[in-house]
Amino acid sequence: MSAAPEERPARAATTARPAPAAPAMDLDALVTDPDTRIIVCCGAGGVGKTTTSAALALAAAEAGRTVVVLTIDPARRLAQSLGLVELDNEPRRVETPGADGELHAMMLDMKRTFDDVVVAHSTPDRAQQILENPFYQSLSSSFAGTQEYMAMEKLGQLRASDQWDLIIVDTPPSRSALDFLDAPNRMSRFLDGTMIRLLTAPSRTGFKIASAGFMFFSRIISKILGGQLLRDISAFVAALDTMFGGFRERATATYELLRRPGTWFVVVATPEPDALREASYFVDRLSAEGMPLAGLVLNRTHPPATTLLSATRAEGAAERVGEAGAEGAGLAAAALRVHAERMVQAAREQHLADRFTSAHPEVAVRTVPAAAGDVHDLEGLRVMGEALTGPDADTPTGTPRTRVLPARRG
Ligand SMILES: Nc1ncnc2c1ncn2[C@@H]1O[C@H](COP(=O)(O)OP(=O)(O)OP(=O)(O)O)[C@@H](O)[C@H]1O
Ligand SMILES: [Mg+2]
């Protein structure tokens, strides 16, 4: 179903110098544009997807839009500051004094969303049968990909309500980037599986297949899976029969929704090799699927306070000041060493960013400096929102926000 990755960008040699300049990403224009209806934040685990989603949602609400952010498992203090003290699976208004628009937040409850789908698409008796089925219970809370699927299901529901100017979707920390984009189709593939079809054939067609072959087959399967589990699966899929078409149709509709104009993906990464490798993978995958990419948010960077003093000169100065032994020399030397370390770290982060841009020169980048502590309240989100949406060159050192360090000349 994925498009042939013909227009996949050719990977540039990573050693090529100088690295191409990454295009700037105008997230301010993106979140305030009335045509932008869905933003999906994705990336590796722990890089700041949830925080970025919440910060963009707040920025859009402050710009006057009615926004809902669908979060997945936010850190507890951030959840509290968004008013998400309990998991109720419905948007709740967040108090945002002074904002022209409205911010609503909800936390995905995977099982509740699945239960709602079952109830909405079958008769009360059938729904009861499914909800009580042990196989359904384990599928709805632990089947690989269920969370991704339910995030998409919930997105479909929110979009259908037409109540929101903008929906921002945080995504689960998928171990494999594939999981997320595959989710809408995984469920219908699962229901389509040959074994499931065989198992349910008797109850589907209304008569029992008592052939020796089938009995043999089901005895083997029972041995492997356990008889009770087999009966649970059978009963579950039979009960799902009424919803069979519905699942597939909605999965396809949601997938298409992601490709429609008005949807944008933001890939989030930290300046670390693993996170950027995952980001590269997302970028390739999104392009292969024809999903619109806004760009890469490089989160938690460490830009130095000044770029006028190199690491080498700061180290040398620290030594000389330390040797001079004047009053306050120890403190000055320590400050110079901190600066030297920061310059080295920034250079490392810039190198990783350059490598990404060499491989994906078309992908816009926005760097977001690490805050001193966790981002866990509206003020923290506002500061992060400014870093995400503020003017491109509005940094203390004048370094454009596509970079951690200024570009080398020549
Ligand atoms: N720019 C930043 N400065 C400082 N801390 C940050 C920044 N961005 C995120 N954090 C912190 O990093 C931690 C991880 O962030 P977050 O929960 O948003 O990541 P995630 O990608 O959603 O994680 P998961 O994959 O587990 O869902 C949080 O404690 C958050 O407060
Ligand atoms: Mg998260």
Image: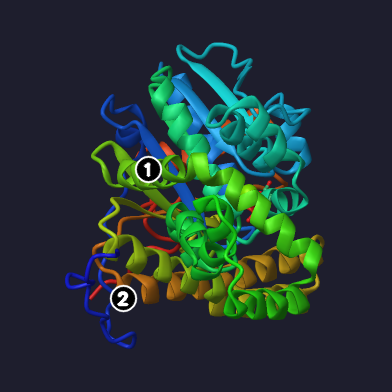
- Quarter occupied by residue 381: top right
Is residue 170 shown left or right of residue 287?
Answer: right
Q: Is residue 148 visible?
A: yes
| Front one among 84 and 395 | 84
* Residue drawn at 77 percent across, 41 percent down: 132
Picture disc at residue 359: 2
| Front one among 40 and 23 | 40
Q: Residue furthest left?
A: 7
Instruction: Report which residue position mark 1 lands on.
Output: 249
- Quarter occupied by residue 174: bottom right
Look at the numbered disc 2 and give the secondary structure of its residue.
helix
| Front one among 341 and 43 | 43
Q: Residues within 10 Å of mark 1 (few under 14, many from 20)?
A: some
The residue type indicated by label 2 comes to: Ala
Which callout, 2 or 1, points at the residue further toward the start of the chain? Answer: 1
Is the CB atom of the residue marked by disc 2 within 8 angstroms of ligand 1's nearest atom?
A: no
